Amino acid sequence: MSTSITSPRPAATVVVLRPASPHPFEVLMVRRNDTVAFMAGAYVFPGGRVDDTDAAAPPDACDGLARLGRCADLAPADEARFRVAAIRELLEEAGVLLARRDGRLVDHAEAAALRQSIDPKGPFVAQLATRGLTIALDLVMPFAHWVTPEIEIRRFDTRFLLARMPEAQEASHDAGETTALEWLAPPAAIARAERHEILLPPPTWLTLARLSRFGSIDEAWAWASSTSIVRVMPGFVRDDRGTVFTLPGAPGFPLPSGCEPFAETHFQLVDGRWAPVRP
């Protein structure tokens, strides 16, 4: 009897960086509510599904439309939808708004007011436009593309985007889908996961590992602006170790052309936690 494979839903997640000391920068992370169906209890980057209402319209309310083209497999209008979704989800889950009024990014008070007043089912960009705002599509940069493996029931086709935290805003979690918000240096987040203090899904872990090598936000942005974006769909194997999540670069699973090697190629699920499988 054949088993049907669930088609992945389009999604966007945004990796927000801010300067920090003594580390080069910190990353905004939210903890998923234990009651949600997908990645319950995990520390992740803000994000969610791309909705039908995430079109970049009206175009005069969108900054950066002429500079799209990072996602070679998407038409500009489709790439814009992922960017809009990333910005919308960042507002909903973390209270951060990448939008401008008269050419300047909005402050915390305006972001907080919009978070409370916006209709989550309405067209996001149009709602910004009625308030005299333009969405800053130029402030989110696609840099990775992850697809949930076919073995999973809930599957997502997710674009990862990078952003800088606006100086005049403060982040706060939504107390709904998320239960906590923290700013963590990438190496510190990985160290906490290794001590079983937080749960990191493998794509989140590997993104943090890649960010750990940069000495500044500018370096990370330059990399995100120029790195090859490769579609990555991990695999699963089940053996005497249990369930093992495999990445390109593992034996028999070659790296796609243009894909940077991953810091880890095997993750094992033990007691609901993913951890690298190392020699």
Image (cartoon, rainbow, N blue to C red):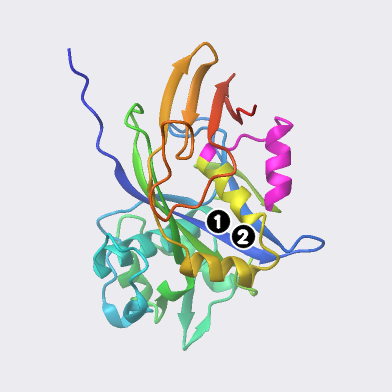
Total marks in image: 2
| Label 2 neighbour load within 10 Å: few <14, some 14-19, many 20+ | many
Amino acid found under the numbered disc labelled 2: Ala
- Which stretch appears magenta? 186-202
Q: Nearer the viewer, residue 57 or 255?
A: 255
Q: Is residue 77 left or right of residue 129?
A: left
Q: Residue furthest bottom?
A: 102
Q: Secondary structure at mark 2?
A: loop
| Label 1 neighbour load within 10 Å: few <14, some 14-19, many 20+ | many
- Which quadrant holds the N terminus? top left
Q: Mark yes or no: residue 123 visible.
A: no
Residue 82 shown in magenta:
no
Residue 201 shown in magenta:
yes
Residue at 46% of width from left, 67% of height from top? 141
Q: Mark yes or no: residue 83 visible.
A: yes
Q: Secondary structure at mark 1?
A: helix
Residue 94's tag is 1
| Residue 232 drawn at (x, y percent) | 39, 45
Q: Is residue 36 above or below residue 125?
A: above
Amino acid found under the numbered disc labelled 1: Ala
